[in-house]
Amino acid sequence: MANVFVASFEILSFGAIIVLVVLGLGIIASMMGIFNFAQGEFVLLGAYVTYLAYSHGLPVWSGMVAAPFLVGALGFVLEALIIRRFYAAPIVAMLGTYALGLIIRECVRGLIGGLYISVPEPIGGSIDFGAVHISAWRFTIVVVTAVVMAGCYLLLSRTSFGLRVRATLENPALARASGISTPTIYGAAFAFGAALAGLAGALIVPVFSLFADLGIRFLIQGFVAVMVGGVGSFIGPVAGAGVIGTLSAALPWVMAPVVADVLVFVLAIAFIKFRPQGLISGKGV
Amino acid sequence: MERTHQTRRRFLSHFAFASGAIATGLGGWVIRPDWANATEAPIKVGIATDLTGPIGYAGNADANVAKMVIKEINGGGGLLGRPIELYIEDTASNESVAVGNVRKLIQRDKVDMVLGGITSSMRNAIKDPIVARGKTLYIYPQLYEGKECTPYLFCTGPTPAQQCDEFIPWLIKNGGKRFALPSANYVWPHLLNEYARKVIEASGGEVVFEEYYPLDQVDFSATVNRIMTNKVEVVFNTVIPPGVGPFFKQLYEAGFQKNGGRLSCVYYDENTLNINQANEIEGLASCLDYFKVLTKDDPVSAKIQAAYDKDFPGNFLFAAGSAATGTYRGLKLWEAAVKEAGKVDRESVAAALDHAKITEGPGGSAEMVPGKRHCKMKMYTAVAKGGNYEIVGRSDGLVDPKEC
Amino acid sequence: MDAARQALRPAASGGPDTPTVECASGGELAVRPVAARRRILPVVEVLALGLALILPLVLQDYLTVFATRVVILALFALSFDLVWGYAGIMSFGQALFFGSAGYGVALLARDLDVTSILLVLPAGALIGLASSLLLGGFLLLGRHPSSVIFVSLGTLTGSYAADRLARGWYYLGGQNGIPSIPSMTLGSYEFEEGAVFYYLALGILIVAYLLCRVLVRSQFGLALAGLRENEQRIAFFGYKVQHLKAIVFAVGGTIAGLAGSLYAFHEGFVWPNMLGVVFSTQVVLYALFGGSGTLIGAVVGAAIIEGVSFWLSDNYRDIWPIILGLLLLLVILFRPLGLISFVLGERERVGRFGRPPKRTS
């Protein structure tokens, strides 16, 4: 019984991590229709900022709080300078963001070398329920993810800014005609997506260690998750991330990890083939 | 540790490295002695190692050791009265780049010997251009899975026999009989586990499970759960970065060490201590040919370590898990062989290297086993305590590699 | 001179999937008649060929070996350019076919001792063909036409999954790959690396290149050109768009497979990275850098990127990937048609079909 509980919790926490990473990707894909190949590197930057704070003697949580803001700001700048030019051609966007990601990744690699650096978690230890141990930090990640998602949902559905964002999501032309400044919305959306990735990176660095190829790992899973979930809405990528995250964490319990690895992708692609709109089609929240 | 000094030191070491490189100009790194005698043709040594990429932390240490050793030999008048020229090429942790750069050493620089390669896949990629197509002597300095019996290929790093024969009985005595073998899925863990299993069972232990994971797996909840529920007493780990950090952390959080479990990992040296927090790997046992703490009671090791630290302060540590000790050993054995042969051609040197011995090496003396192309050396068992190692076991003499 | 060059210069900053139009600067330039336009493309091709032929004579041994590798990679880049430049399929998975063929022939050599060039090269091409038919069929064919993004992601995932599988499968050597592949043979003669292998690879590249040229200038190619310009309209004309794409994808896969088998024997080992995403994207970068949709652009791009990286690897190893990323970004932003667009006009990309119209006097 305890086993099932531990297993479920582990699956849930891994799923939460994937959701955080994918949320930003999904928002950018839904809003602007481009797949941001540099999203993994935004995660890496979030992790790096956290490490930087730690290595200068500041408490880890301060780095974690700063990361989303710093990465979001960078995202905003990049969007204004570079990404904006790609909206017309999604394929070129993939390549351009890939090049951007390459630059970021190699810069970080130059800064930290080829090492795997550990960063301690702000809330360490474990929470004990009798014989069952749960990592306190991973529990925190689940809580933060839930809060962030709830916050996003509230932002989108209850605020006027959210209203403008939703309008742009559903019908950009009409939104523009109604006087909503779509370039500003796009800039904000990209910055927000980057900030989410930065937050994800900051939260997961105590779990995964900091290394230069941290981003690539999540990139492919992220894309598949977004496609499985469905582009165009807020809930879609979240659902997709949940599914992919759960499958990736659960399957190794019942089969060899290598097979599980590949199977997740095969299933995902097959699913998308037969249901191209993904799990949740339609635009809006 | 010295985290705040890291960046400054790293910048300095990079700067020194870069300026050295720029000074020698195009064409890889060539290091010549100051007194290069015009009448004596130089002996050319090639080093092919990972200076960039994920294995860069080890490759740079090996290159530094090579520079140190060659400088010392040249300082003493060279080898056979001839100066040694050192050619360093970057294998970049990337096999296909490596093959191209190794070809430069062989075809353009025409070196007399190549030492290098760290991962087994790198060794496999470059051994052909060096030994078969290039007809050059090749020394491989890193701990590995054994079974490399190619002629003219000499291995100076620990083999499974050296890492397991004395270590596993110690683990059984200081940990327990129930072993788990969580492993990264590639050649080294497969073959190492095969050997380890034999020793475990022969020593009265039992392998509860043996599993292989993709190299970038970072979530080990299933494994940790299996370890805890099966009451495993010793984890004989061969998971490598990036997975090893999260794995050890998850294992610690599940209470493995609290319940008396013993963690062991035969590639863990001073480099890898930083991957986890000190409390997470408290009590971790490793078995290698050298640990820095040996400098306290072994003057030879102290001398070598001090010379290295003086010339190369910074992040690239002189440690046994990154082939630095194997590089030192390999170069000194080769030097002895060339002195004995009196010539530098492959046949003569290989024949002499076959039974070469050195008395002064990191961790102790070393001897090649005739006909086997592998090296006997002293092995030490150490346990991680508070972020440093403590020696808890030493081999009685030189341990047999039992290869080929 | 200057005016003619201006007439050939394409419009600024259109993406590869937006058709661009010749621009006449100011109003002083009248539209020139077709016949008077210089055909630069054949000149470029002949120049490249000439350079390639004399290379081993002027280079040292080990550089010839490097040049052979570049030729094989150029063949690989060609396969991508065919698929992307002519059929609009952004395949992030060409390495899947390249690597599968490489592994296939490596296994043939290791387990069955088959090294004859007459068997392994066709085997490689066949493996490339089979795998690309499978993947292409699944991704492209079906009741609903697949979106461009889906095909891209599908090929990316295919490449990634193959990489993971090879990495985890011990029979294939796992992460270490299969080393020590013996040399290719023809009877008792062994193809060692050097000038002979170089000319062999070059010969194969030339044949493949010519085949591709014929293909894209044929009637089939005309349909492809129409596909590139406006997919829907071509569909309305009655062409089965998805079948066209699948055919081109299969041809591309075959060429990639051929390149893969050559690479395996030249380098002497195969490893999972040959199947993976990084390698796939590398070939995308070659073609993009050189200029997609021109065939020669892919070859030029491969040569330049590999050459510069080889030269830089001596001095600026650490920052070369950053420089590469920056260069790429600049090309994508400001010169999306690739470097070759400095020389070739848009007209030459699409090409001429059939005979030129008869001019009356």
Image (cartoon, rainbow, N blue to C red):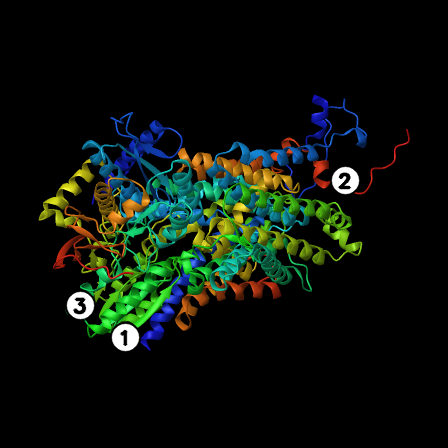
- The image quarter in which residue A57 lies: top left
Left or right, B91 with respect to B142, comes to right
**Residue bearing mark 1:** B230
Using the numbered discs, state the Cα–Cα distance from disc 2 to disc 3 in whole angstroms: 78 Å
Q: Are marks 2 and 3 in contact (CB under 8 Å)?
A: no
Q: Amino acid at mark 1?
A: Asn
Residue C106, position in %: x, y? 49, 58
Residue A102 image label: none
In the rendered structure, the residue with mark 1 lies on which chain? Answer: B
- The image quarter in which residue B15 lies: top left
Q: Which callout, 2 or 1, points to the residue nearer the camera?
A: 2
Q: Amino acid at mark 3?
A: Pro
In the rendered structure, the residue with mark 3 lies on which chain? Answer: B
Using the numbered discs, state the Cα–Cα distance from disc 2 to disc 1 in whole angstroms: 72 Å
Residue drawn at 51 percent across, 40 percent down: A79
Crowding at dot 1, Cα within 10 Å, few <14 / some 14-19 / many 20+, comes out as few
Residue B286, position in %: x, y? 21, 58
Q: Are marks 2 and 1 in contact (CB under 8 Å)?
A: no
Q: Are marks 1 and 3 in contact (CB under 8 Å)?
A: no
**Residue bearing mark 3:** B169
Residue B253, position in %: x, y? 26, 63
Q: Is residue A17 visible?
A: yes
**Residue bearing mark 2:** C352
Residue drawn at 68 percent across, 47 percent down: C212
